[in-house]
């Protein structure tokens, strides 16, 4: 059993209450999310206070992570005249494992951002909640032979659930904000007018209970767009969320940070590790929590054993197997949890890596649950991805009675992986997502079946007696 995390450390002190500050120089707020207010001039404290009163002293709790995106998000909210509180979420305890963790450094960087912007700073600990609702599921998925995406699960349960409730119930905020590159169909003022409610989760939402649903839309920077990671967020959370970076590009965000002296976060490397855990030797990390389960690497072509491994959970479909006793690179194409075998193929584009059919669990639909077209026709055309920055692939969804869908892709796609999320799009709208549970046959398997069929036909023809 995984060990339980220790208690969180004491929170650092909060700085003085908010004092409105003037913009330091010319400023252009762009696009829909900026409210189309035009250009800032050089303004004094009286102007800033007047602006704060003009927006009714709206209070926004902004998640600050110690990175450049959340720092600029807080800055932009401040520049719109809102009362802003920075909140750092501690979801992983560095004392809970061997090795180093950057959480304390990130917290210090977030605190410095809040000092720089002259906004209150709060630290909240969700170590226990993260362990129970994200990390335990993360380990379970690996034990089942799947490859989970904890970032999507973390956003669903921690940032857009526990943090949302903390901001509304404890801080008295009117809305929350994050540094995600995403947009919604609501203007800021519409967000502030939304009622804050806690709804019980059912199989489907009542179509007549939720009117004027909020849509989740891709960010202006399509390369950086993070709607993929928000595809499990609830409708109620989106109603109370502002995404200040939705209309901006990453390069422009960095420029804003530089112009406003946020150099300590601008110099930091982009976070690429597991949500709130960071970058590390991932195999070694997993083996701190899961017992080794040795097995064989088996060739998918001739079933020959090519080597051994310490556990199927250490490998995911599409990655290099790292075989030491063969000359060329071999790639993982499938896993058999019952035997511990990992099947490998001798090419990164081997047909055993390509499939065009998958099934999800019950899909979480963001705006319409399920979409009216899918309910009416039992089928719907849209686009699909299962990795953050992969190109969108056209597909057809077929709705099942339990809320899951079959996804038929217009062309075979490399390394479809159980445990990952199938995220669906129509135009610039993110419709929602479902976890991949089953895969259809690979191109290699279909080719083998076709070859056997043709061989059987040829054998039948050869054995037919000639007519006399």
Image (cartoon, rainbow, N blue to C red):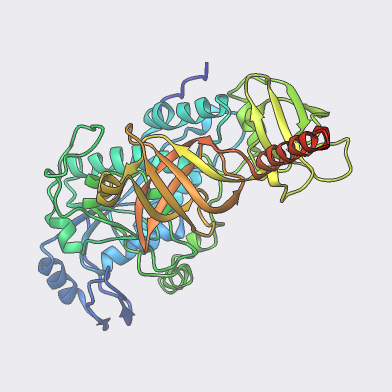
Q: Nearer the viewer, residue 327 or 361?
A: 361
Q: Which residue lies furthest to the front in this view?
A: 468
Q: Residue at x 62, y 29 (%)?
A: 313
Position of 408 compared to 233: left or right? right
Position of 123 compared to 415: left or right? left
Instruction: Tell me: residue 26, above or below residue 130.
Output: below
Q: Which of 380 and 120 is in front in this view?
A: 380
Count of all numbered marks drawn on residues in the image: 0
Instruction: Tell me: residue 186, above or below residue 379.
Output: below
Quadrant of residue 457 in the image?
Answer: top right
Q: Does residue 45 appear in the picture of this structure? A: yes
Position of 64 compared to 166: left or right? right
- Rendered location of residue 188, percent (x, y): 20, 63
Q: Nearer the viewer, residue 376 or 38?
A: 376
Q: Which residue lies furthest to the top in this view?
A: 1
- Rendered location of residue 169, percent (x, y): 18, 40
Quadrant of residue 383 in the image?
Answer: bottom left
Instruction: Tell me: residue 5, above or below residue 377.
Output: above
Q: In which quarter of the image is the C terminus?
A: top right
Q: Does residue 16 appear in the picture of this structure? A: no
Q: Residue at x 67, y 21 (%)?
A: 292
- Rendered location of residue 148, percent (x, y): 51, 36
Q: Which of 419 and 219 is in front in this view?
A: 419
- Rendered location of residue 321, percent (x, y): 74, 38
Q: Residue at x 20, y 53 (%)?
A: 213
């Amino acid at each position: 059993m995984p060990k339980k995390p220790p208690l969180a450390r004491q929170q650092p002190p909060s700085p003085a209450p908010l004092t409105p500050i003037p913009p330091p120089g010319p400023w252009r707020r762009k696009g829909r999310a900026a409210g189309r207010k035009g250009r800032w001039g050089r303004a004094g404290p009286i102007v800033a206070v007047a602006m704060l009163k003009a927006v009714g002293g709206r209070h926004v709790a902004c998640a600050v992570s110690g990175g450049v995106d959340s720092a600029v998000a807080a800055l932009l909210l401040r520049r719109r005249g809102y009362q802003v509180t920075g909140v750092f979420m501690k979801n992983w305890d560095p004392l809970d494992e061997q090795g180093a963790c950057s959480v304390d450094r990130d917290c210090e960087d977030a605190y410095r951002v809040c000092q720089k912007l002259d906004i209150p700073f709060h630290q909240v600990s969700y170590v226990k909640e993260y362990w129970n609702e994200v990390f335990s599921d993360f380990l379970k998925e690996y034990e089942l032979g799947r490859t989970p995406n904890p970032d999507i699960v973390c956003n669903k349960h921690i940032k857009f659930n526990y943090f949302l409730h903390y901001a509304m119930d404890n801080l008295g905020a009117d809305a929350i904000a994050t540094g995600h590159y995403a947009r919604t169909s609501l203007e800021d003022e519409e967000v502030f007018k939304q009622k804050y409610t806690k709804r019980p989760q059912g199989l489907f939402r009542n179509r007549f209970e939720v009117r004027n649903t909020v849509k989740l839309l891709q960010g202006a920077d399509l390369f950086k767009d993070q709607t993929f990671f928000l595809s499990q967020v609830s409708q109620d959370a989106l109603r109370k969320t502002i995404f200040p970076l939705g209309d901006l590009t990453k390069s422009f965000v960095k420029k804003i940070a530089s112009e406003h002296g946020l150099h300590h976060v601008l110099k930091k490397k982009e976070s690429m590790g597991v949500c709130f855990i960071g970058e590390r030797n991932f195999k070694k990390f997993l083996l701190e929590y899961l017992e080794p389960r040795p097995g064989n690497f088996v060739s998918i072509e001739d079933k020959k054993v090519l080597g051994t491994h310490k556990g199927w959970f250490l490998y995911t479909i599409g990655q290099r197997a790292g075989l030491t006793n063969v000359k060329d690179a071999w790639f993982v194409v499938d896993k058999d949890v019952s035997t511990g075998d990992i099947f490998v193929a001798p090419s990164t584009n081997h047909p055993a890596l390509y499939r065009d059919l998958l099934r999800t669990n019950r899909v979480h639909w963001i705006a319409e649950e399920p979409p009216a077209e899918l309910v009416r026709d039992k089928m719907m055309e849209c686009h699909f991805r299962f990795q953050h920055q992969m190109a969108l692939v056209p597909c057809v969804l077929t709705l099942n009675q339990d809320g899951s869908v079959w996804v038929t892709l217009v062309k075979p796609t490399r390394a479809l992986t159980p445990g990952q999320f199938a995220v669906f799009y129509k135009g610039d709208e993110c419709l929602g997502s479902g976890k991949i549970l089953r895969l259809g046959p690979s191109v290699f398997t279909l080719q083998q079946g076709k070859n056997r069929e043709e061989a059987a036909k040829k054998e039948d023809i050869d054995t037919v007696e000639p007519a006399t």
